[in-house]
Image: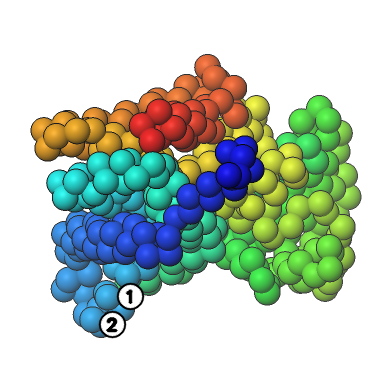
Amino acid sequence: MANASSQPAPARRRLSPSLLRYFTISFATPLVCALIAFAMLFLLNDVFDDLGDFMGKNVPATVTMTYFLACQPQNLAHVAPISTLLAASFMMMLMGRNNEITALRAAGLSIAACATPVWVIAALVCGAIFTINEVVAPRSASLAQKLRTEWTENKQKKEKNSIAFHHPLERRDWFFENFAQTGQSRGAIVRQYRPDGSTAWVLSAARAEHRFDTWIFTAGDVKVYQQDSNNLDAPPVFFSQKLCHFSETPKNILSHSREWELLTIRELYEVLRADIMPTGKIRRLLMVLFWNRLTFPLASMVGALFGVAFAIVPGRTGMVRGFAAAVAMLVLFYLIGQFTLVLGKNGWLPPFLAGAGTNLAFTAAGIVAMWKKQ
């Protein structure tokens, strides 16, 4: 008789591919349906808000459709978290009603491990939202704004693309009558200040272009002013072409002329690194936005974690309460996130804590809740 101690250890229980496939389909199907449904609701909301601006102005139907479609990528960041929560909750409630959760636990399987496809898909959604916000949304928003300006604004406003920019460290002001990030800008004026705040010189040019870290000004003049006086130190010096090496680039100038909330993470980082900001308050605002943009895609994972964890309760009534609690947690997530953003922008919270604290804290809370309920 063989010794009991010589008996082979039982094989470690593994998740079957069919079970993982079942979880994948059970989560992905309602997720896609929820994303489409919420996207349609946002589209209808945009149509009701903006369609009147295009009516009666002979705007082609293709232009109108392109405008509304270009507005949608910006909405995906708000659609994804609630979609993942609803999909996860629906999956768990359906499995609970069919007693599948009880069967999995009776078989000694971990719910968290069985739901691995949920975490993978939620992580992919986080990555997709991050990519869309960085690549697709800025271009689509720019296209939507261009179409709106071109077809609904009056001609005088349409043709005007003037930009003013101030570089505090170099003590320089820039103004462009018609700014172009690539190619030639028209009507450029550069004003240089002395340390005491008086004007040192003013450069005016019909055209300006940036090439290879060099500004090329064409058809203009330079006026040099006397110290502590608005009088010219000498007659204007006219030029047909003048090369200047200024630290400002068209990308810096354009970034500062746009709304801060519309900048991408890369643009925010470049602006912060360049340190071209008139006040410390704006720098704090940009740092808060940077950390928030970097971590907000985690909201989709938060929705999946709470959607699964809160639905693992016995009884149909308990599942409904769990679903309501999960929705309440996501609403609380949004409310606290917006509140901390306001505190951070006003200097009452450190930028990292204000921008990333809520996203990281709720992600950690979701992981803990899932670990306790598995």
Q: Please name whichever residue, 274 or 371, is drawn nearer the observer in this view of the structure.
A: 371
Q: Which mark is residue 66?
A: 1
Asked if residue 126 can be seen in this view, the reply is: no
Task: Give the residue at x 84% y 68%.
Answer: 212
Q: Quadrant of the C terminus?
A: top left
Which residue of the protein is positioned furthest toward the top in this rendering?
Answer: 348
Q: From the top left corner, tell me how far across and down residue 72 is, in percent.
A: 34, 62
Q: From the top left corner, tell me how far across and down residue 93 is, in percent.
A: 20, 45
Task: Give the residue at x 28% y 59%.
Answer: 26
Q: Secondary structure at mark 1?
A: helix
Q: Please name whichever residue, 359 or 40, is drawn nearer the observer in this view of the structure.
A: 359
Q: From the top left corner, tell me how far across and down residue 204 is, in percent.
A: 73, 59
Does the residue at mark 1 contact the one at mark 2 (Cβ under 8 Å)? yes
Q: Quadrant of the N terminus?
A: top right
In the image: residue 348, left or right of residue 219: left
Give the residue pinned by disc 2. Answer: 62
User: Hey, what amino acid is under mark 1?
Assistant: Thr
